[in-house]
Image: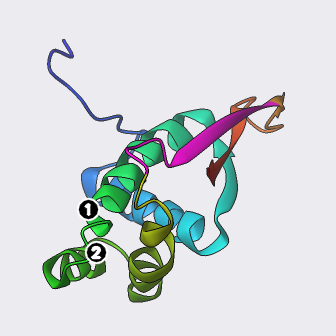
Amino acid sequence: MKHLVKTKNFHRKRDQRNALMKILAHNLIMKERIKTTTARAKYLRKIVEKLITKAKKQDLSVLRLLIKKLPKKSAYKLFYEIAPRYKERNGGYLRVIKLPLKRLKDNAELSIIEFV
């Protein structure tokens, strides 16, 4: 039974899943718009929005936390460029747009995730 299970596993072990989300978050922050599956986009939105909310504090301890969770280049971009944009916004920093086409290999639904 799957009672109280709050994470999707994407058929991966924990360290592989964390690495996947770290790479997706890095690509999203650097390019500000990526195309991925709908399930991954929805899960990634939850992770990145929490990081943006923390980065809005503009505190040294938050910057250290971001460097721990993300690659250094994307952590700095999130802290110095992206978070100040959303200083007055209370949430909803990312948008997931479902695409009408599906991936050829496994027929997975595709989406675009981008900053608002």
Q: Position of residue 27 (x, y in %)?
A: 58, 69
Residue occupying the point 41% across, 65% down: 22
Q: Position of residue 4 (x, y in %)?
A: 14, 20
What residue is shown with label 2?
66
- Which quadrant does the N terminus fall into? top left
Dot 1 amino acid type: Lys
The quarter holding residue 46 reads: top left
Is 114 left, or right, of 93 in this rendering?
A: right
Stretch in magenta: 89-99
- Marks 1, 2: nearer the viewer: 1
Q: Position of residue 40 (x, y in %)?
A: 52, 42
> Along the line of sight, which residue is nearer the eye, 77 or 86?
86
What residue is shown with label 1?
54
Dot 2 amino acid type: Leu
Residue 30 belongs to the span the image colors magenta: no
Is 68 left, or right, of 24 in this rendering?
A: left
- When the figure is inspected, residue 19 is found, relative to residue 46, above or below; the finding is below
Is 15 left, or right, of 46 in this rendering?
A: left
Q: Position of residue 39 (x, y in %)?
A: 53, 34
Residue occupying the point 58% across, 63% down: 28
C-alpha gap between disc 1 and disc 2: 9 Å
Mark carried by residue 28: none
- When the figure is inspected, residue 84 is found, relative to residue 36, above or below; the finding is below
- When the figure is inspected, residue 2 is found, relative to residue 7, above or below; the finding is above
Label 1 with label 2: CB-CB less than 8 Å: yes
The quarter holding residue 10 reads: top left
